[in-house]
Amino acid sequence: MTARSIRGMAAATMAGALALTAAACSNPGSGGSGHGAGDSAVVGIAYEPETLSPLLGYGKDGNSKIFDGLLAFDGDMRLRPALAAALPEVSADGLTYTYKLRKGVTFSDGKPFSAKDVVFTYRTILDKKTNNPSKTELDALKDVRAAGDDTVVFTLKYPYAPFAERTVLAIAPEHVAAKQDVNSGPFTTSPIGTGPYVLTGWSKGEKISFKANPRYWGGVPKVKKFTMAIIKDDDVRATRLRSGDLDGAILPPNLAKGFRNDGDKKTYEATTYDYRTVTLPTHHKVTGDTAIRRALDIAVDREAMVDNILEGAGKPAYGPVPTDSEWFTRGTERRHDPAAAGKILDDAGWKRGPDGIRAKDGVRAAFPLWYPSGDKLRQDHALAYASDAKKAGIDIRVQAGTWEVIEPRMKHDAVLAGGGSPGDPDFDQYQLLKSSLGGDGFNNMAWYDNPAVDKALDDGRKTDDKAARKAAYDTIQRELVKNPGYTFLTHIDHVYVVDDAWDGLSTQVEPHDHGLAAGPWWNVEKWTPKK
């Protein structure tokens, strides 16, 4: 829900001269062309994963290229069978899910896939010794067992409505991963899976390379070589795309518009659950003050951000749930009202000083706001937010840094963060807001602590009654109006520019993942070169 993506992130992965394009990926200043015979593709992504092991969180939301889940999402975000032969049979009480497995599937090393690999994967993720930051997503799971080689039975502690959606999680091979340290073994960087592609190399900070899996149960992909070039800087990614080093990339809207008149390229816009938010740490005298939080929530001009930063490719955000979702609570929209923001601060004792900045009990209304270096969208959001805050008498110092610099400061310093996962509201909110997850990596970065929200999170998670769940998530969204531990700014559409060289490209409703598993290449295994 943040930069962890965690969860989340934007952009990914051609070449008759593959050696040339591979060299270009390593050297941003080099020449070369991404174009080749149509059977290879190189695309730019903004971030790289911390691991390639499903046991540690990679591929938990599907589209991992190396792996498959029991189920997968189609282009319309409907569940379809993948390693499972059909959708699961669910017991009347919602506590048992039974999956029949697809026959004849092998891992890329030729070893057969079976139920024991599924059991191994889920049990290992839930093991206390496994460093998987998303393990709470499987809190409902009581047990998983194999009933022969081709059937898996999951038993839940409580009826968890979106459990089937959790089974898009990538499956690891027991015969490889069980023989090494789950947290540090070679499988974390050199994995083997059942997916459409096989990893051929990972140069940290430079590129991740794949080749088509000749054993893939879904048919051998037409795109034989696929490379994700890791380019954190938005401007560099655009330059590389324009020079021909890349065949596609995610770009901020204001950079993507520079390619509109390029007849050799197409632009794709994907709607998303991806939000940008400012964390307001509870453990800071200014950001932890409810009046400051409430004032910032209405001092910020979200519509101006959508118009000027996103160029209309997005919408205002008032929480993790997008305003066009059936789970959004009407009436929780916050209007831009600088006068009301000033009154909140005045009434709470935050008085303006000679320099226009407020103070209370000797504490100046000032704090730093960090964003990751090279991320132009976050930079622009941060600067706009700081400008709006200054008008209300709050001094925000915008600073750029790497995540290695930012992460140790998150308990006390604000961060321009991101997150969002399509589908069930539990996916977006539990890890973002649950007080017990404060300080757990990139979960609950603001250390938000609200007993009413904690209870509603549990209530929404532990029933499959839709009306009861809607009531719970309504409570959460209303509580965020009373005491916002984050200032949600925008939900951003993802904009991709790709060479018009293949058929079969489309987009899904996307998470916050910076294109690693999303983008028009979510189904690259189905692309066909144009004649």
Image (tube, helix red, strand yellow):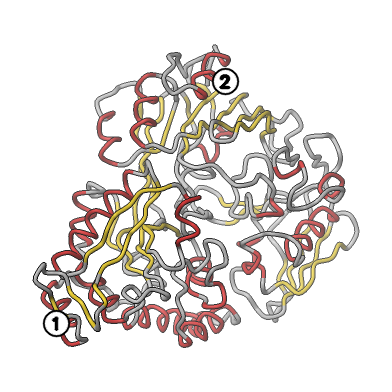
Q: Which amino acid type is marked by label 2?
A: Asp
- Mark 1: secondary structure: helix
Mark 1 is surrounded, within 10 Å at the Cα level, by few (under 14), some (14 to 19) or many (20 or more) other residues, namely: some
Where residue 280 sits in the image (x, y, percent)? 37, 70
Task: Give the residue number, with chain letter if any, for mark 2.
Answer: 39
The residue labelled by disc 1 is 343
Q: In the rendering, at what x and y percent does residue 77 appear?
A: 51, 54
Front in this rendered view, residue 244 or 154: 244
In this picture, residue 315 sits left or right of residue 117: left
Q: Position of residue 122 (x, y in %)?
A: 75, 61
Residue 133 in the figure: left or right of residue 456? right
Comparing labels 2 and 1, the label whose residue is closer to the camera: 1
Q: Which residue is drawn at 45% across and 15% down?
A: 33
Where 128 sits versus 464, above or below?
A: above
Determine the image quadrant of residue 343: bottom left
For this view, does 338 lie left or right of residue 21? left
